[in-house]
């Protein structure tokens, strides 16, 4: 029933894909709701208002375990589009965004402090060091996230295979 699957680049920390299906959106949602209610499935998940959330079971879960978020969009009575997004658990994503926000705020603060110290002809070594150091931390966060994505890649593939089996 899959007509076509499109994926974004491997560079992204939260890979996305889109699948055009020759099936009604309600049938797809009902099918996933039935499958996710069974006890013997290898994943846990739920269906909420056109969205499907599939996660790794608690026993196999680690810090970098992915979660699959699917959105079913009805294109016509006989055609739907399934948009998928792999991402870390919401707690991990929130932590990463918080750290990015803190680093960005500190960078702007030290930028202002650097300008002020230069204008007042005072020592500006510390703000300058921080202006160099903070972007390095930011870049290291990207690579840390990429490493985490690679750690959860096998689970991501299992989630994708489970989704394909149940469409």
Image (tube, rainbow, N blue to C red):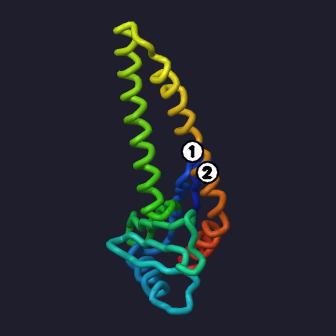
Q: Where is residue 153 shown, x and y percent of the image? A: 65, 63
Q: Where is residue 21 shown, x and y percent of the image? A: 51, 68
| Residue at the spot of label 1 | 142
Up/down of 98 relative to 114, above or below: below
Q: Is mark 1 on a helix, strand or loop?
A: helix
Up/down of 35 relative to 60, above or below: below
Give whichever of 90, 105 is nearer the camera: 105
Q: Is mark 2 on a helix, strand or loop?
A: helix
Quarter in which the N terminus is drawn: bottom right
| Residue at the spot of label 2 | 146
Residue 167: mark: none
Q: Where is residue 151 shown, x and y percent of the image? A: 65, 61
Q: Answer few, some or many: residues within 10 Å of disc 1's Cα (few below 14, many 20 plus, some between 14 and 19).
A: some
Up/down of 57 relative to 4, above or below: below
Q: Residue at x 57, y 81 (%)?
A: 59
Q: Residue at x 59, y 69 (%)?
A: 160
Give whichever of 14, 121 is nearer the camera: 121
Residue 163: quarter of image: bottom right
Q: Where is residue 57 shown, x and y percent of the image? A: 54, 79
Q: Are marks 1 and 2 in contact (CB under 8 Å)?
A: yes
Residue 110: quarter of image: top left
Up/down of 26 relative to 96, above or below: below
Outermost left residue: 49
């Amino acid at each position: 029933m899959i007509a076509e699957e499109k994926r974004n680049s491997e560079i992204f920390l939260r890979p996305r894909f889109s699948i055009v299906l020759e099936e009604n959106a309600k049938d797809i949602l009902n099918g996933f709701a039935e499958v996710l209610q069974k006890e013997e499935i290898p994943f846990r998940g739920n269906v909420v208002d056109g969205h499907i959330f599939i996660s790794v079971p608690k026993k196999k879960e680690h810090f970098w375990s992915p979660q699959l978020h699917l959105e079913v969009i009805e294109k016509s009575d006989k055609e739907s589009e399934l948009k998928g997004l792999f991402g870390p658990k919401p707690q991990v994503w929130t932590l990463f965004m918080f750290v990015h926000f803190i680093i960005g705020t500190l960078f702007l603060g030290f930028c202002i402090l650097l300008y002020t110290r230069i204008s007042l002809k005072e020592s500006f070594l510390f703000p300058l060091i921080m202006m160099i150091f903070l972007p390095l931390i930011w870049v290291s966060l990207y690579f840390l996230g990429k490493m985490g994505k690679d750690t959860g890649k096998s689970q991501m593939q299992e989630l994708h295979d489970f989704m394909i089996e149940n469409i």
